[in-house]
Amino acid sequence: MNYGVSCGVSTMYRVTKRLLMLTPTLLMSCCGPGVQDGPFLTQSNTIVAELAKPSTPYVATDVSTQTHHMPFFEDSYGVRALCEAYRASRNPSYLAAVQAWTNRIVADQARMIPHGAYYMNYSEFRQPGETQGDWYVADSSSIAQAVLCTEQLSNNSDGARYRASAQQFFSLVEGAYTNPDGGTSNGIWGSYQASWWASTAIFGAFAFEMYKETGAPVYLERGLKSFDWLSTTGTINFVRPSFAQAAPGIILYTGEFYVQAWPYVQGTAREAIASKQLQFVFAWMAANQKSQNPNSPINYIAHGQTYMAGLPALTYSMQVGNADAELNYLRTIMANETDLANADVWALTTWLAWSESAQLRSISR
């Protein structure tokens, strides 16, 4: 099924005009204590309860409700949402949950080969201590962003451990899996070593976050190299899979990347390129989100299309358009999807919570 861009000229014009007039900032953690209820915190409580279950590796056929057996990259968006839930409410259960999850990540990382790699929690791929099997930069870069988010909430001792973990991961990828063309390969993905859109986008977004946290130029340089590779390659030219095959995921990951990149390219020669890329992202969303186009063919609960739940976060972050309607649509879907033993339902849950946290930050600006 083709999910390519299919928006009218008027929609593109409105998005373009808004982006060119906008002077946005990245989402800031500006919510104070006092938020005690609402859909976001209800969703956050669900995530806390799920993460508290005994953890087992992800197996597609595992339907147990007694264990938590999901890929860690899906968990990572829930963890990032819980970080914002804690900032908003100061509920200690949220901080405890993200630190417990991150402690597990750091403990597994200490046993991973190569040094600095994150364990992804796939039963069929590389396990801690093993020297064989696939290991992915893209999935691990999502994990790294959650580790960094936890670091920002933690005290000196724990925070130092978490930052060191993120730095070790960055050093591994920067030294072994980046390419002369500026892109990033997906680590140990069979024998495929070419730069790939997902690993380049997610690792690049993580690099920008590391730069924001540390001010070290090496992180900014990697983010900008990622920007140049992604924009030069062109979204519609991505492969493995192509845009026609995987538009929701490509829009989420590249959209998040360009949102993270915006403060560092605004006012530079890259600004026009970034604006054009964001126009593409938001135009596709206008044409394909169910809240904006009820005839959209996308099935949000189908495998590979659950990424739709994360897209409102992009809208809130850039303050372009109206994400509330889409968030409400997603909540109606989730009202009937409670089987968190299903990886697609868990993905919807975590990405929806991430979008809800973006809504909360947007309101509090």
Image: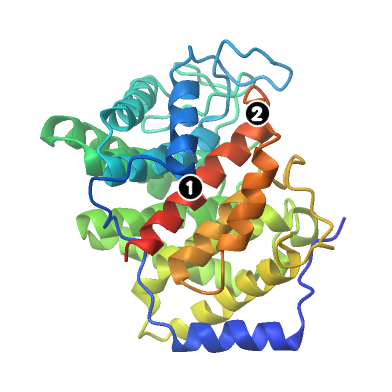
| Quarter of image, res 74 | top right
Badge 2 crowding class, 10 Å Cα cut-off, few under 14, some 14 to 19, many 20 or more, is few
Q: Which residue is drawn at 55% across and 13% down?
A: 67
Q: In this view of the protein, which residue sits in the foreground, 134 or 207? A: 207
What element does badge 2 sit on?
Answer: loop
Image coordinates for residue 157, horizontal then vertical, percent = 13, 30
Q: What residue type is labelled 1?
A: Trp
Could you tell which of marks 1 and 2 lies nearer the N-terminus?
2
Q: Residue at x 42, y 86 (%)?
A: 269
Q: In this view of the protein, which residue sits in the foreground, 238 or 284? A: 284
Q: Is any atom of residue 236 visible in this view?
A: yes
Query: Which residue lies under the disc numbered 2?
Result: 338
Q: Which amino acid does label 2 sit on?
A: Thr
Query: Which residue lies under the disc numbered 1?
Result: 354
The image shows residue 195, relative to residue 52, as above or below, that is below
Image coordinates for residue 21, horizontal then vertical, percent = 45, 89
